[in-house]
Image (spheres, helix red, strand yellow):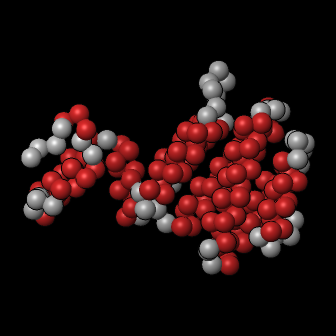
Amino acid sequence: MAPNKSKVSWKDVKARLTDLSETELIKLVHDLYVGDKNNQHILHARFDLGDDVLGPYKATIHRWLWPDFGQDASVGRAKKAIADYKNAGGQPDDLAELRVFYCEQAAGFIDSIALEDETYFDALIAMFEHALVTIAALPLKKAQSYSNRLENVSLICHRFGYGVGDEMDEFLANHGINN
């Protein structure tokens, strides 16, 4: 029985995929790859291909956290870039890089324009904590570089007031990082 066309789900697609031969499956992936840049980014991230797998994700984060004059910022769209990378099966150290980069971009933008937006602050603090959790799972040498960068973010955030830097210091201390 064919599924109701208005309510097709992943389960229906998955059932059809099992019927494909290896050649048909490769052709399908090829068609998806050439048909959409986002699919290319997903496959590059999944298989760690190319010189700059993180480039498109970083560009998206930068665009939405540090918009050009006259454009809106969007923490949701910036966070979506990180979720997209994670869902693509990206590498843990690259996920840490994206989360730390997010913190650096957000802190830099706030500092550069003296932004006073509680939602933006809250999103930065939440990402800061996610970054710390992510780097805690990395080998010590890699984690140290990211920790140093987050300490710099915390120092910048002390200039804002509103307790942002203080909260970050607490997170750093809770993760055994002395600020």
Q: Which residue corresponds to the image point at 66% horizontal and 59% vertical from the top-left? A: 130
Which image quarter holds the C terminus?
Answer: bottom right
- Give the mark count: 0
Left or right of 153: which side holds 162? right
Q: Which residue corresponds to the image point at 49% horizontal and 57% vertical from the top-left? A: 86
Q: Which residue corresponds to the image point at 72% horizontal and 47% vertical from the top-left? A: 124
Q: Position of residue 165 (x, y in %)?
A: 86, 51
Q: Where is residue 5 in the image (x, y as percent from the top left)?
A: 18, 36
Q: Where is residue 15 in the image (x, y as percent from the top left)?
A: 18, 56
| Furthest-bottom residue in this view | 140
Note whether 148 is above or below 33 in the view shown: below
Q: Would you identify the image quadrant in which residue 119 lies?
A: top right
| Furthest-front residue in this view | 1
Note whether 162 is above or below 147 in the view shown: above
Is residue 128 among the parts visible in the rendering? Answer: yes
Query: Considering depth in this image, is 110 or 8 the residue closer to the camera?
Result: 8
Left or right of 3: which side holds 10? right
Left or right of 70: which side holds 156? right
Q: Which residue corresponds to the image point at 18% horizontal and 38% vertical from the top-left? A: 4
Left or right of 149: which side holds 88? left
Note whether 126 is above or below 73 in the view shown: below
Query: Considering depth in this image, is 17 or 45 the residue closer to the camera?
Result: 17
Is residue 52 among the parts visible in the rendering? Answer: no
